[in-house]
Image (cartoon, helix red, strand yellow):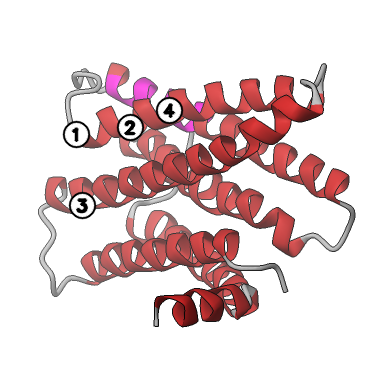
Amino acid sequence: MAKQSSSSFKAASALPATLLAHLLFIAIFTMVLVWLLHFREGVAFRSLNKPKIFNVHPLLMVIGFILVSGEGIMAYATVPSSSKRQKVVHMILHLIALVLGIVGVYAVFKFHHEAKIPHVYTLHSWIGISTISLFGIQWVLSFLTFMFPRARSSTRAKIAPWHALLGIIIFSMATIAALTGLTEKFIFLQLTKHSQEGLVINFTGLLILLFAISVALTALLPAP
């Protein structure tokens, strides 16, 4: 029975999960824009309306660490090209995600500084700082190992499974950070479950969770 389940898992294609992930990408992007532009008055790096500065944070963190990073993980299944080119796309997308993440973290530190709010005092912030730190370390080590100057083929073969595992772990941490951040904002804004903004935040969180599951399935199942 176990062997039959294992063979069925291997025979399954990643295509449905990949298609679902792309649809969720569009839905999440739309929901975040609706939330920040319609309910939260927009985004700005400089403004007398300080919450606009904060809004840069969730926008860039969701786009970078969830959406772009997720697409980077799926690159080996979604980019119809050679393994070498897939690797380049994978690294570039994760570099974009890292840059967006750094700017997003800068935005929230800038907001806290100007609004005179303590830094890094919630579970969300602890998870977020840990995630972006591991993400940065993972990217640099991966570039040195797989791109330039490149380790020996035997070394790369040994490291590759651990690289993939750590990548999924970091992406899971990013997902947790996003969900705790949305929950934290829901509570800080004192929203009710029946408010329109509360519904937007909750549905965005559910879509992010479904996106993360779809990305994980795409990475684990055979490419279409």
Q: Nearer the viewer, mark 3 or mark 1?
A: 1
Return the residue at label 4: 105
Q: Which mark is residue 92?
A: none
Would you say residue 104 sits in the magenta stretch? yes
Q: Can residue 48 be seen in this view?
A: no
Q: Nearer the viewer, mark 2 or mark 1?
A: 1
Q: Where is residue 82 in the image (x, y as percent from the top left)?
A: 89, 53
Give the camera-side residue of 83 and 108: 83
Task: Tell me the distance, in whole angstroms, between the alpha carbons under discs 3 and 1.
Answer: 11 Å
Task: Tell me the residue at 40%/43% (across/down).
Answer: 174
The answer to whether 94 appears left or right of 207 in the picture is right
Return the residue at label 1: 123
Tell me which amino acid carries mark 2: Lys
Q: Position of residue 16 (x, y in %)?
A: 59, 80
Residue stretch in magenta:
102-112
Tell me which amino acid carries mark 3: Thr
Q: What is the quadrant of the C terminus in the image?
A: bottom right
Task: Tell me the distance, in whole angstroms, between the alpha carbons under discs 3 and 4.
Answer: 18 Å
The answer to whether 67 appears left or right of 153 in the picture is left
* Up-down relation of residue 95 to residue 15 (above or below): above
The secondary structure type at the circle numbered 1 is helix
Tell me which amino acid carries mark 1: Leu
Return the residue at label 2: 50
Q: Which mark is residue 183?
A: 3
Who comes first in sequence, dot 2 or dot 3?
A: 2
Task: Tell me the distance, in whole angstroms, between the alpha carbons under discs 4 and 1.
Answer: 15 Å
Q: Where is residue 170 in the image (x, y as percent from the top left)?
A: 44, 39
Q: Magenta: predominant secondary structure element? A: helix
Who comes first in sequence, dot 3 or dot 4?
A: 4
Question: Residue 20 falls in which quadrant of the image?
Answer: bottom right
